[in-house]
């Protein structure tokens, strides 16, 4: 099994706030990340796919295909976006980077077929990175 990891970058803003909680509790839980105006991050996204190299091409996947699905499913949707405004992705959950990482993984697992997406790693800052992974054959 060969694992191929590709790196992408995008910027997005969010406010960590749960509307089901009182204002004071939101401030206590999320601190400065609960700022009403929100705040932004320059995210580094790593997407890993796994498979055996195609005997004809020698590649696990065509990078142009992988880049295309990441562009359509992730970068077009989230780059320069306010994550709180994305009601499809975050209607029922706070747009933490943990939840964003899970949402990216879900979208890529659904949208890319040449080789399974087995890992998504999302770096929020030089101190914080979040990762979700699944080995080929596992199912979430």
Image (cartoon, rainbow, N blue to C red):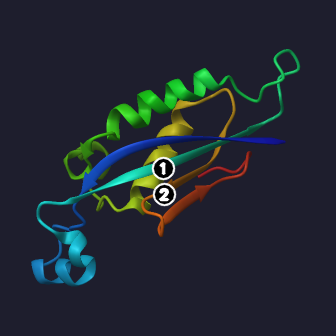
Residue 118, position as x, y percentages in the image: 66, 47
Residue 52 vertical position relative to residue 1 in the rendered view, above or below: above
Q: Secondary structure at mark 1?
A: strand
Residue 95 vertical position relative to residue 3 in the rendered view, above or below: below
Instruction: Please indicate whether residue 49 sits to the left or right of residue 54 in the image.
Output: left
CA gap, disc 2 and disc 1: 5 Å
In the image, which disc is placed on residue 44? 1
Residue 63 found in image quarter = top right
In the image, which disc is placed on residue 33? none
In the rendered view of the protein, which quadrant contains the N terminus? top right
Residue 131, position as x, y percentages in the image: 56, 59
Q: Nearer the viewer, residue 83 or 102?
A: 83
Q: Secondary structure at mark 2?
A: strand
Residue 54, position as x, y percentages in the image: 83, 23
Instruction: Name the residue rendered at 51%, 63% in the picture.
Output: 129
Residue 123 vertical position relative to residue 18 in the rendered view, above or below: above
Residue 38 found in image quarter = bottom left
Residue 21 found in image quarter = bottom left
Category of crowding for the residue at label 2, using alpha-carbon neighbours closer than 10 angstroms: few (below 14), some (14–19), many (at least 20): many
Instruction: Please indicate whether residue 120 sits to the left or right of residue 43 in the image.
Output: right
Instruction: Name the residue rendered at 27%, 41% in the picture.
Output: 80
Instruction: Name the residue rendered at 42%, 27% in the picture.
Output: 72
Earlier along the polypeptide chain: callout 2 or callout 1?
1
Instruction: Please indicate whether residue 125 sits to the left or right of residue 48 in the image.
Output: left
Residue 34 vertical position relative to residue 80 in the rendered view, above or below: below
Category of crowding for the residue at label 1, using alpha-carbon neighbours closer than 10 angstroms: few (below 14), some (14–19), many (at least 20): some
Residue 75, position as x, y percentages in the image: 40, 35
Question: Is there CB contact under 8 Å for labels 2 and 1?
Answer: yes
Residue at the far front: name it.
Answer: 126
Instruction: Name the residue rendered at 16%, 67% in the picture.
Output: 19
In the image, which disc is placed on residue 123? 2
């Amino acid at each position: 099994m060969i694992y191929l990891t590709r790196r992408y970058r995008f910027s997005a803003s969010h406010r960590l706030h749960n509307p089901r909680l009182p204002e004071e509790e939101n401030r206590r839980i999320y601190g400065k990340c609960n700022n009403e105006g929100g705040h932004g991050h320059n995210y580094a996204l790593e997407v890993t796919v796994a498979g055996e190299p195609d005997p004809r091409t020698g590649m696990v996947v065509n990078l142009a295909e992988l880049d295309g699905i990441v562009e359509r499913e992730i970068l077009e949707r989230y780059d320069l976006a306010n994550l709180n405004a994305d009601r499809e992705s975050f209607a029922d959950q706070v747009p933490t980077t943990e939840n964003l990482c899970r949402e990216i993984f879900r979208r890529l697992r659904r949208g890319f077929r040449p080789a399974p997406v087995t890992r998504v790693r999302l770096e929020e800052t030089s101190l914080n990175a979040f990762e979700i992974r699944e080995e080929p054959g596992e199912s979430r």
